[in-house]
Amino acid sequence: MAPVTDSESGGIPSAVSTQLRRTREFVDETEPPALAIIAVMTLSLFAALVGFLAVSDLTIVPFVVFLGTAAIGWVRYQEETAYVIALAMTVSTILILGLIIVFIFRESVPVIRYESATVYGVTVPGLRMFIQPNWDAVSPPIRYSMVPMIHGTVMVTLIASTVAAPLGVSAALFLSEIAPATVREVVKPGVEILAGIPSIVYGFIGFTVLGPWASDQFQTTGQGSYLFVGIVVGLMALPTVVSVAEDALSSVPESMKSGSLAMGTTDWQTMTSITLPAAFSGVSAAVLLGVGRAIGETMAATVMLRGVPRLTEPLVNVFYGQETLTSIIARNYGEADGLQMDALFVAGAILFVTVLVISVGAQYIEWRMHKRLGGEI
Amino acid sequence: MSENQNPQPQTGTATTDSDQSLTTTTGETVEQTRDEWTNYEFQGEAKMTVEDLDVYYGDDHALKGVSMEIPEKSVTALIGPSGCGKSTYLRCLNRMNDRISSARIDGSVRLGGEEVYQDGVNLVELRKRVGMVFQSPNPFPKSIRENIAYGPKKHGDLDTGLLARLLNRSDADERDRLVERCLRDAALWDEVSDRLDDNALGLSGGQQQRLCIARCLSVDPEVILMDEPASALDPIATAKIEDLIDDLSEEYTVVIVTHNMQQAARISDQTAVFLTGGELVEYGDTDQVFENPHSERVEDYITGKFG
Amino acid sequence: MAGASRTGGNLVEKETTETDAVAAVAIGLSAVLFALAIAAMFERISLTGTLAGVETVTLLGGLLTALGVAVIAFGVGSRFGSVETDPDPSAGIIAGGGAAVPWVVIGGAVASETLGFGTAVGAVAAVAAGAVAFAATVLPREDVGSTLPLGSLLAVTGLVFFTGVIGPTWVWELGWAQQAAITAEFLIPVATLFTTLYGGWASAKAYGGFGARGRHMGAYVLVYLNAISIVAFLFTLVAYVVVQGVPGLLNGADIGLGTGPETTILGVSVTLPVSVPFVMNGVALFNDFQGVLPAIVGTVWLVIGAVLLAVPLGVGAAVFLTEYADRGRFTQVVEVATNGLWSTPSIVFGLFGFAFLIPRFGNGKSLLSGMITLGFMLLPLVVITSREAMLSVPDEYRDASAALGVSKWQTIRSVVLPAALPGVVTGVILGVGRIAGETAPILLTMAGGTFIPESQTVDVIGSFQFTSAPPFVANPALLEATSALPYQLYALITAGVGLGSSVSDPNAFRWATALILLIVVLSFYAIGIATRYYFRRRLRHN
């Protein structure tokens, strides 16, 4: 196991210098032939990456070189080769996230330029997408507004959260604090399976069963409503909330719960006064992640919504469902090209950034909770 | 209430049977072969009476037919090697073992004459009357004040919530008096009186444990169970806890599990020795048990030949 | 003595059978009403029809009123001492808020719509009604506070239904630009459902004798109900898909020697003894029964490709992060990045594949792009679960191995990886279940056409070829657009009525596709959960 050095306080510069020092030590300690193999592997892999990015037909050449040297290295210097391969794999994981960011944003640049708006004499690129609600890709003036889709996503997410948050936290309490062991053995896999049901199946049932029923109940014209998309998406986000919240609740030390019970409180009092407050940040992280799932849910929304990018009238009319950020991509990628395709990438970028912020926020909250519970008890 | 009928308490009279006047005639077949000296006779009244208590965890027979009476307002120490069932026994007295789903409990535990293991027992009431202090300090992640006020608040004896404040019927003064009294009784007041609103997790280990004792006192229990309360503490903190236990025994019935034989000898009035396999082997006056044990196995254990 | 003055209490509860019975009957009544409301919502019982000889709405109204009266009676009886309970001085702010919500709705709706005072007055009335309900809950002693407002809610709702003020044909036109209305069909079951939940909560509190125990009871009723509902929901969902899907799946199925198609197993030509055309055929003009074989094969290859990409990458990264890298900023950043990647919406992966992969693999949708996109999606999960599994391998193992002079990589290979294997395998299987059901990414990167003819069922192994020009290796199968089950289902849904020309019963065909997809995905989950269970049991036995 690598020695745990505390580079937390030093920040990134000191981490980099530590890494440099270790690299130098590594170079000093390694035999020259092994070092050569490592160098060839690294260079060829890098060349393959560059070739791939440049859409070159010759990409395969450095890649084969890499495979060849890796094979030789594996046989003769397994220790070093394993290290380099593991490192390369770590780097590629980060690289993928980087590539996603680069490509999503790069593709959305033209439409952001096109949709510039001038406020107080300053031209702000992309602003017009957010200050007028009109999406029209066919007849001039061509406008790509994100407002209707943001409205849709907000509506769906709000409804989904009101479904998923209370039910999910309650189910997590049940699983972690209340259920007898045998019941838990049944309910827990059940919740996992609920997470496994493909979203298109939810969407299909929503489309064939829920949609006609809802349009009948609310006497709407045609089917597709934010209300029921929200409910379905909420049910889909439920397992995320349950499993993360359950983890948080069970990480509250048993001794704290026993301490409260030994005072003669009821189980419910212990849960509300000790367990839930202690796990509060973890539970809110669970709800946040559930919200993230709801925002990103695509297929159920695509299938159940009307697919007309406009605002509902009035804005609170949940009985009509037009389009969300996710569904507009799934629905329009086929016939879209040029600016319209780029506009879809803008929708993707909004989704990506929102969910990334939520994910990082949730992780920060969880990290703080573990530090508090784990560090001082 | 099982009265002690014997007018002349014969402390330390050891017999290998259990022909006490208060045990029932059923279950008399305690094997004579087992060397048990457990019918300790004492002056005063028994606070808790345990008869033929068996505990199983699944297939594991953790406690075997334990019977003992715990005298009122005194300190009873439970000692024995690890895994001998003394903590299990302790947790039977306030039914904390109910939390373990695989545990099965047979036998009788009476608190002031009322059976603890019967249908309709109010666990809230039982645990209010039989408080518990745990091995490692477990204050709640709240302020010191809130830690003490927690029990009375939950039992509806104190109300300092938003609503009570709005309606001007907050018991804040009563709460503060209670907090001070409990902290004084737990010998912690002088150390924390100026920071009652600080988080209790910021206290040192010994302070935390005394806070837990103060918290336990806040609901005014009759019996206080302590599960190795000083095992996680340094010698100075341990000494403070021991002094505290001594003071507490004037008002409360204290039952304490400890690993530390010197500690048991110092603080307890009577000592029960459990040996491996979940048997209670000897129970008697502390001086007698430590200086002149009847059982050879107990003598071996106390003198350190095994354990 | 230290401590607060002891409030009297008995160790053993007294038997109070009669009052318990009243509260228990109220809970039972709530359960019946709950079931009736659900049944009415899904139109299992008709609102216009009769039930047990009484009109449904009248019956619901009557039962609600009875429940409300019972709840009030219990609370008032407790207040005047005829029922023995242990109430707190107040029901508390949370209960007050809970009771206020329905009264806000009722107050607002009645003032603005029924009495026609408009929105502004409606809002005032809503706040006023809510405030009264809140005060009535919070100010009196708990026994009255937690029964009277909720009991009145039940009674009022019940009387409205009972007297026919809201009958089966009642409609409230919302008058919005996009036409929508609230009908009795919707309102009556939903109002019954929610008021019944309140009624059950209040009865459960009463059953527990109010106080701490009463609240415990009330909360447990709701928490248990929620857990049961989730399980029931899951069961209904799966059962519904099965019932709808089986006819289409077994359309033309046959069991018996020589009925199935011929296949070659280990070089021997065998005729399978079963024939299920739906999973063994594609779609072709002259087929007796159409099927989704190409989509199944597509899904299988997709999963294989994604696993081949993600598992080595993910496990390698996890090895580096847990075994080689210092725990500090770097690992923290990678951790945040992988978690972020894991919650990235699937459609964003699709967009990425569309922008990044498609131009690099022949400028068209292809199986290979789909594989890589799904591999990228699976990657963070593999990293996360493998890391968790490796971190849970005790350091003692590593120390013991290192103390024997074994090198680091040898230690990882022979100690850490085997010990972490169960966790990695389980995580990967569950992750595969997830990506096998994903539609959005492959929509943009891989899938084309509603139907893929049977002749185009992908054969990846058979179509490798070497070429003289770069890139020297070609595999047309990998570079061709194909289908997969989730996409197939999506295409079938969006194809709408046009489907009738190629499939005789489009609806049965769709449901059968959904069923097959569900079976494929859930079997991954079943295997994953079973593996975890197996490893856990083996661990316990060792």
Image: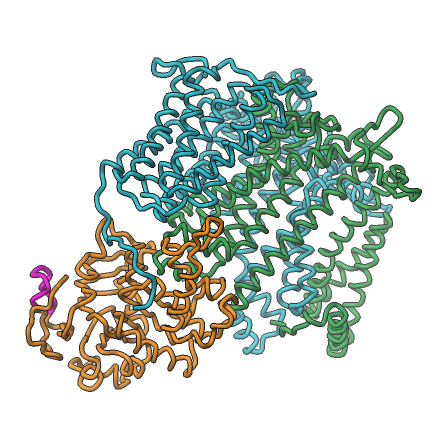
Residue C407 position, x and y percent, is 61, 74
Across and down, in percent, residue A212 comes to 59, 20
Q: Which chain is green?
A: A
Look at the image and say whether residue A254 sits in the magenta stretch: no
Based on the displayed image, in which of its 4 quarters is residue C315 positioned? bottom right
Q: Looking at the rendering, which quadrant does residue A30 occupy? A: bottom right
- Name the quarter where the C terminus of chain C is drawn: bottom left
B219 in relation to B41, above or below: above
The image's colour scheme reads: by chain
Q: Is residue C309 visible?
A: no
B303 vs C140: above or below: below
**Can residue C175 be spotted in the picture?**
yes
Apparent side of residue A93 relative to residue A196 in the rendered image (left or right) = right
Q: Nearer the viewer, residue C105 or B293?
A: C105
How many numbered circles are shown? 0
Q: Position of residue C242 (x, y in %)?
A: 50, 28
The verdict on residue B28 being magenta is yes
Q: Pick whichever, A79 or A347, lies toward us.
A: A347
Residue C421's spot in the image, x, y percent? 54, 58
C42 shown above or below A299: above
Residue stretch rendered in magenta on the structure: B21-31
**Image position of A319 with respect to C436: above or below:** above
Q: Residue at x 37, y 23 (%)?
A: C63
In the image, B8 versus C452, the foreground residue is: B8
| Most frequent secondary structure within the magenta stretch | loop
Colour assigned to chain C in the rendering is cyan
Q: Is residue C524 left or right of residue A157?
A: left
Single out the residue that lies furthest toward the front: B168
- Where's the N terminus of chain C, which quadrant? bottom left
Chain B in the picture: what colour? orange
Q: At x 76% / y 34%, what residue is drawn?
A: A147
- Please state if C521 lies on the left or on the right of B272 as rendered: right
